């Protein structure tokens, strides 16, 4: 991996999340599925999730369309717009300041056009935009792509992970219905003087593993759970180690580990093998379930807002997902990179 260009560093200067208001608890699910709160908590760590679609959504009058929420309740785009707007506000930036929007999602609202077009328009951006589908590794793929665009000349990139997985979950299948939820997380990645905050990264895919986790157009998520579990632990560990090696850091240097939020047992196994104390892991899945591309930015936002990182701390983010994809990044946290500068550079 070539070193980042000098004097075109990047930092996260704004971050925010959006969650739909409807909370579905394990007890809610066990009222109509052959499952229980204790099974779900023991096997996954999940206690509740937020959803837009499905039997818990506010129902339109026509029962034939009960899996679709009434217009205006929410979409992948609307969650992304909310998170993106709040992230811009947090960074004290306007729509005109953004050069590129990367919308990481595996649940676009339409086949065509890309959901990023809808988000770009609603946020009033006048910049390039594209969807990025790398499943649950999507946000870290997006972060690495954003830092590379900044190295190449962009000033500010809005990266959003947004998902409505409740739309592609079969709510009658207990093996998948208990796992997933909806949400969005967004960050502004901004050009800063000096070194890049992205110290090391690793991205990849093994396309031969497509059959263990997929959803056809119009279909629902199909998963060979045990095999995904086994591969997920290995991918998280090996990819995290590759990113740390490239960053020339060790697990002892990592202040906060933000893994993909799929299953607490996967997180525990990965922490044990990486020799990162579990107390350093950001865990939000108990309240959100697996939100795919949104899971890492959601957990990152919550941890940062809780004061779990200080300027200069190293964050390791690592995701895995359908494909199977994986992506890891070691990021040096600096929330206010302009404090020592006379002036924030103008947008271009
Ligand atoms: N409630 C009660 N029992 C259940 C449920 C449920 N919700 N789901 C499955 N079971 C039953 C099974 O039928 C099985 O019963 P049996 O022994 O009578 O056959 C038993 O529980 C054990 O099932 P397993 O599949 O062996 O359970 P396991 O311990 O492997 O846990 C799980 C299943 C939670 C799905 C786990 O394999 C897992 O987390 N896998 C990874 C999932 C994942 O990370 N997916 C997302 C990838 S990211 C992306 O790209 C979207």
Image: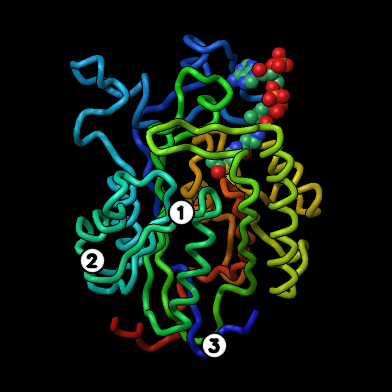
Q: Earlier in the sequence, mark 3 or mark 2?
A: 3
Q: Position of residue 84 (x, y in %)?
A: 33, 56
The residue that disc 1 covers is 133
Q: Position of residue 334 (x, y in %)?
A: 52, 71
Q: Quadrant of the C terminus?
A: bottom left
Residue 287 to residue 118: above or below: above
How many C-alpha atoms fall within 10 Å of the one at disc 2: few (<14), some, or many (≥20)? Answer: some
Residue 8 to residue 280: above or below: below
Which quadrant of the picture is home to ligand 1? top right
* Residue 16 horizontal side relative to residue 64, left or right: right
* Residue 127 horizontal side relative to residue 305, left or right: left
Q: Quadrant of residue 190?
A: bottom left
Dot 3 and dot 2 residues touching (CB under 8 Å): no
Give the residue at x 21% y 28%: 70
* Residue 125 tag number: 2
Give the residue at x 26% y 71%: 127
Give the residue at x 38% y 58%: 131
Q: Quadrant of the N terminus?
A: bottom right
How many C-alpha atoms fall within 10 Å of the one at disc 3: few (<14), some, or many (≥20)? Answer: some
Q: CA distance from mark 3 to mark 2?
A: 27 Å
Q: CA distance from mark 1 to mark 3?
A: 27 Å
The residue that disc 3 covers is 5
Determine whether the residue tagged by mark 2 lies in a helix, strand or loop.
loop
Q: CA distance from mark 1 to mark 2?
A: 21 Å
Q: Position of residue 19 (x, y in %)?
A: 38, 40
Mark in front: 1 vs 2: 1
């Amino acid at each position: 991996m070539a070193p980042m260009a000098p004097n075109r560093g990047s930092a996260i200067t704004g971050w925010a999340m959006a969650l739909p208001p409807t909370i579905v608890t394990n007890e809610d699910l066990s009222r109509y599925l052959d499952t229980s709160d204790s099974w779900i908590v023991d096997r996954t760590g999940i206690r509740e999730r937020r959803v837009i679609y499905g039997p818990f959504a506010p129902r339109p009058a026509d029962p034939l369309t009960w899996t679709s929420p009434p217009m205006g309740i929410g979409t992948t785009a609307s969650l992304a717009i909310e998170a993106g707007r709040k992230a811009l506000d947090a960074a004290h930036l306007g729509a005109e300041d953004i050069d590129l929007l990367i919308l990481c999602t595996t649940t676009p609202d339409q086949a065509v056009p890309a959901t990023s077009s809808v988000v770009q328009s609603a946020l009033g951006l006048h910049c390039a935009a594209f969807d990025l589908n790398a499943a649950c590794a999507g946000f870290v793929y997006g972060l690495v792509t954003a830092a590379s665009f900044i190295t190449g000349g962009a000033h500010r990139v809005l990266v959003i992970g947004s998902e409505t997985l409740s739309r592609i979950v079969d709510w009658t299948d207990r093996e998948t219905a208990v796992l997933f939820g909806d949400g969005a997380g967004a960050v502004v990645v901004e050009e800063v003087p000096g070194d890049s905050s992205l110290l090391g990264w690793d991205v990849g895919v093994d396309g031969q593993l497509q059959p263990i986790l997929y959803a056809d157009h119009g279909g629902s998520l199909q998963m060979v759970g045990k095999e995904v579990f086994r591969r997920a632990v290995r991918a998280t560990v090996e990819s995290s180690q590759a990113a740390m090696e490239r960053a020339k850091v060790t697990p002892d240097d990592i202040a906060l580990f933000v893994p993909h939020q799929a299953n607490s047992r996967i997180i525990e196994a990965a922490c044990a093998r990486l020799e990162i104390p579990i107390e350093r892991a950001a865990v939000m899945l108990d309240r959100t379930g697996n939100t795919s591309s949104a899971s890492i930015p959601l957990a990152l936002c919550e941890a940062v807002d809780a004061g779990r990182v200080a300027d200069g701390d190293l964050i390791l983010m690592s995701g895995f997902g359908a494909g199977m994809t994986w992506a890891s990044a070691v990021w040096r946290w600096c929330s206010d990179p302009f404090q020592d500068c006379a002036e924030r550079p103008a947008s271009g």
